[in-house]
Amino acid sequence: MSTIKISDLTVSAVIGTLEHEKIYRQKLLLDVEFDYDATLAAVTDDLFASVDYSAVERAVVKCVAESRFSLLEALARAIGKTVLAFDKVTRCKVVIGKPAASAFGALITYTAEFFPGE
């Protein structure tokens, strides 16, 4: 099994439980990691035997940009489902950082792993 990690992806979303969070977009920091069997891709050097991580990145950005959730947990699940929809992906780990969530300047993050069929 091999892992691809998309790190430090900055996106904006409408997310939160406070009134202003339901109106204005906020910056989120994402790490998205996924596993797949890369044996054939490594042997053939063929993109079609791989998972196109650029396409995964675009799908994640679109998912987040079009979302409206109260909780990071719900957004993470939506991202996980988006990544797992790609053929060959067997696991997805999502880490979401929400800089505006802390009153003291800390980076609050939520992490979850998702598997097909969940």
Image: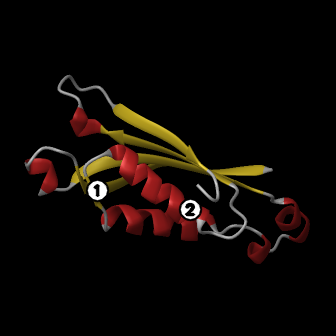
Q: Say few, some or many: other residues with alpha carbon within 10 Å of mark 1 (under 14 / 14 to 19 / 20 or more).
A: some
- Mark 2 residue type: Val
Disc 2 from disc 1: Cα separation: 18 Å
**Label 1 belongs to which residue?**
12
How many dots with numbers?
2
Percent of width and height locating residue 24: 13, 56
N-terminal label among 2 and 1: 1
Using residue 49 as the reference point, say whether residue 58 is left or right of it: left
User: Quarter holding the C terminus?
Assistant: bottom right
Label 1 secondary element: strand
The residue under the point 52% across, 56% down is 80
Residue 33 position within the rendered picture, expressed as x and y whole percent measured from the top left: 59, 49
Residue 6 visible? The answer is: no
- Quarter assignment of residue 25: bottom left
Q: Is residue 80 above or below residue 86?
A: above
Which residue matches tag 2? Answer: 83
Q: Is residue 103 above or below residue 5?
A: above
Residue 74 badge: none
Point 11% across, 57% down: residue: 23
Element at label 2: helix
